[in-house]
Image (cartoon, rainbow, N blue to C red):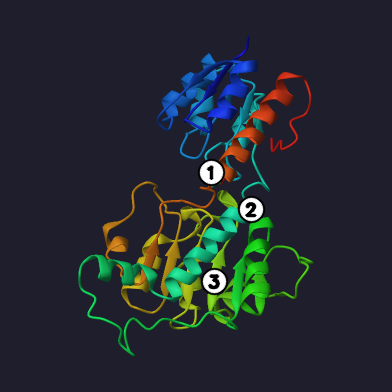
Amino acid sequence: MRRLLITRQIAEPVIAAARARFDVTLGRDALSEDAAAQALRDFDAILPTLGDAFSAGAFAAAGVPRCRMLGNFGVGFNHIDVEAARAAGVMVSNTPDVLTDATADIGWTLILATARRAGEGERMLRAGRWAGFGPEGLLGTHVSGKTLGIVGMGRIGQAVARRGHFGFGMPVVYFNRSEKDPDFPARRIDTLAGLMAAADFVVVCVPGGAGTARLIDAKALAAMKPGGIFVNIARGEVVDEAALIEALEAGRIRAGLDVYENEPQVPARLIACENAVLLPHLGSATVETREAMGRMALDNIIAWADGRDPPQRVA
Ligand code: GLV
């Protein structure tokens, strides 16, 4: 039987299905670069996820790996150096589509919680600081009818925008490399600064990786409307976190974040910002979605084991 490493606990039915086909080892903690190199040497296939460091260094340290297939659990795979994987003859797949709705829903959780100051309100109530209903208490920003700006109009960006258009009557603008043709009205804006300036709510949905690192810099944040709401459900590295903290500390904007530059570390200065809603990377975290992701990752590994092309192959 081929040896498969599943680097973290995933849904039991998926693990059971994996055990029927492979000699499975179940990991517990995120793999460091050294541990990833060792895993590449020891296993025929790996089902890794975010935080497992399959960097160029890991591939270099592994030499000629025994592993031939990384069936990633997650749509984002910027923790895997795909060039190094390709050079080492290791296939890579991911799990698109199955997490689109769950991730768009977290985008909306953040839009609403930030606009309506839900985090502040909850903290106040739990701390026993609520003095009762007041006409001026914790006033937020109206959402319906405001302009929604999407950075990265892929599957998840379109799902966030669709909810905004149909659910909240929002005009949608977007910044994307190519023109898109969604099933609702949306206007493409040519420049990032133009998008940031036009929207009341900016939601970042681009994939992580070298091409989008620090795409949202101090200049882009400065282009936002005063009081604008910035939401990131993509990757922390897409945003200059220090510049974002400065904009929040200055009280210029508010933010809802699901992702951070050095997860799970979140800067103390960011935690101190009352005008930010901070979630611990929950984008795809529903029981149904996580099981579907596991099944898709495993199906890709089974396809590889059967000599077929993995359907969600990315390298
Ligand atoms: C989660 O962030 C994913 O990329 O699936």
| Circles 2, 1 touching at the beta carbon (< 8 Å) | no
Decide if residue 34 is on the left or right side of residue 95.
left
Report helix, strand or loop for mark 3.
strand
What residue is rendered at 47% in x and 30% in y?
9
Residue 216 visible in the picture: no
CA–CA distance in space, label 2 to label 3: 18 Å
Q: Which amino acid does label 1 sit on?
A: Val
Residue hosting label 1: 287
Residue drawn at 67 percent across, 24 percent down? 89
Residue under numbered circle 2: 100
| Quadrant for the N terminus in the image | top right
Where residue 114 appears, as percent x and y from the top left, is 43, 71
Q: Which amino acid does label 3 sit on?
A: Val
First along the sequence among labels 2 and 3: 2
| Residue sitting at x 69%, y 38% | 314
Q: Label 3, on which residue?
A: 202
**Local crowd at mark 3 within 10 Å, few (<14), some, or many (≥20)?**
many
